[in-house]
Image: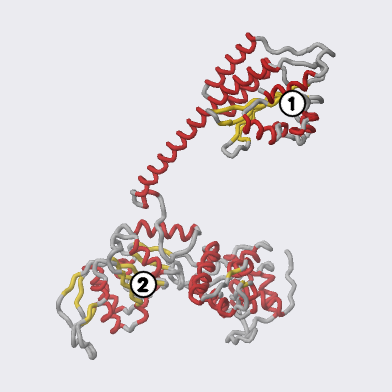
Amino acid sequence: MDDVATSRSMLTEGVAAKPPRARPPSADTALLGIYEISKILTAPARLEQTLGNVVAVLSSFLDMKLGMITILDQHGNPEIVATSGWTSRDGSKPIDTLPAKVIDRLVATAMPVIVEDVSRDPLFATAAGTITRAIGAKVCFLAVAIKSDSRVVGTLSINRTSEDWISYAFDADLRLLTMIANLIGQTVKLHRMFSADRQRLLNECSTLEKALVSCLPKEIRGERPAVAGIIGESPAIMEVLDTIAIVAKSNSTVLLRGESGTGKELFARAVHDLSRRSAKPFVKLNCAALPESVLESELFGHERGAFTGAVAQRAGRFELANGGTLLLDEIGEISPAFQAKLLRVLQEGEFERVGGSKTLKVNVRFVFATNKNLEEAVDKGEFRADLYYRISVVPVFLPPLRERPGDVSLLARNFIETFNRENDQRHELSASAIETLQRCYFPGNVRELENCVRRTATLARDETIVDHDFACASGKCLSALLWTSSASGAYPHAHPEPAAMRAPAPEEIASASRGAAAPVSSFDKETSSRLGAAGEEGDGFASSRKMIDRERLIEGMEKAAWVQAKAARLLGLSLRQVNYALKKYNIEIKRI
């Protein structure tokens, strides 16, 4: 208590000047206070609330202006601060009245700290102004350490004004504060023990839950299975993946329908990988790549001597895929004669090799793919209706890239990373480059996007690819000529697809928002056919079409209420061609 005695000796100067006005709490008052505080500390509540109630009770029987309980974390920083009597007009906080030097001394020595006048003590050099503004002049300070076992875990302090008294019996107050601090220390220890046990139980529970969930199938866990090669987070692609995950569990025949370049082979592989046949072979064949005679041999196999050059027996794709999955791509391109041969394999699961008489039976899961409008082909007699019903058991429609614009950036960055790995480059796409790609229509879908990224990366002069590096920025994008063509016939609507049903390009959406557009179905078809035209030779790229003349362009724009997207549909042009013609003829867009 030497430090206390030294600090307290400063208070005895001028003791005889005035008798003390403040009185220490009596023994009965102190005992009552400890009893009330012990009830609060043993009540079930959050530690912050408990300490706040303790300091409030403490202020009711001790003469003080500010009481504060500070609990420190493992690094010695204030973690919980509970106060009573604090008012501030300048936005300062109660902890601002307790300097770090005071906390450091209490932690280091575990001895009480008594200061007669905080405005004159170097310990409070940084906090004296805050204390004076909040409490008043000539403020004295008392503090004791809150200990848990032998470690200091916090502080208990009070502030008093000393204007009207000279001496005070601090010994009684220090004894009382020390006893209360000991009770608080035990409470903090129990709370931390309970908190540690609770966290340990939560961690164990979480570990057990993860172990249990990892033993469950992915479909029960509600997770989408990982599919190699398929990149995208758009709702359209997520819906397809959910469908694939469900379909893969059965042996039903799947018909993948989508425009060219939408990744039909990848989705066919996903059907196989997510099925019970994933350990068996996955065999694929493009039916449009081979003539009928060769296609028959490829699928059914052939015997030795079946035809010229057949020097040995050869197993066909049906045999190679036995027990696994067989993908027949471009199924809409096979001839009617071959359709009949294929129908038998689908119905009976049996066939004979070319030149052979032995009937072979196979167990194959069929996946077919096409970008052709099979309904129209059946209607025209180009595709057998009975075969159509055999292969279209579970049709899955793959969305074109224009219906999943949010995936363009993911795909583009994946393609540039692949290009960098293959060519030992360090190209990256800038924000302007991504915006340029997202504005493009990509009639060739993902395949065209990949080609565009690879071409641009090959010709790029710098490592960072920007918007003007793309061919479309200089008018050299040849795929723009395809924008006016109808969509693929892979979907069961009339072919060609009406312009009103075609998904608009991002540029069309932006242009359409600049003016009110009347319903497309109300346009004058006679005027449209009379105004029809296409692009002309421009920017060094030849075209068999002629540039629309100025009068027809203006007439079409007026008919479309000067909305470029609608005018493009009326005139049978792409949005880019309309925009080019407007700039060429220097026609100012009217705002209606």
**Residue 29 placement: quadrant:** top right
Drawn side of residue 584 relative to residue 211, left or right: right
Q: Which element carries disc 1, helix, strand or loop? A: strand
The answer for how far apart the CA atoms under marks 2 and 1 are is: 99 Å
**Residue 431 placement: quadrant:** bottom right
Most extreme residue toward the right is 17
Q: Which element carries disc 2, helix, strand or loop? A: helix
Graded by Cα atoms within 10 Å as few (under 14), some (14 to 19) or many (20 or more), the crowding at tag 2 reads some
Q: Which residue is mark 2?
A: 378
Please say if 451 is above or below 150.
below
Residue 145 picture location, percent across and down: 62, 27
Front residue of 279 and 548: 279
Please say if 97 is above or below 399.
above
Q: Which residue is mark 1?
A: 115
Say which residue appears at 51% left-offset and 31% top-offset.
192
Front residue of 574 and 441: 441
Most extreme residue toward the front is 2
Identify residue type, mark 2. Answer: Val
Drawn side of residue 579 relative to residue 353, left or right: right
Q: Which mark is residue 92?
A: none
Say which residue appears at 64% left-offset and 20% top-offset.
177
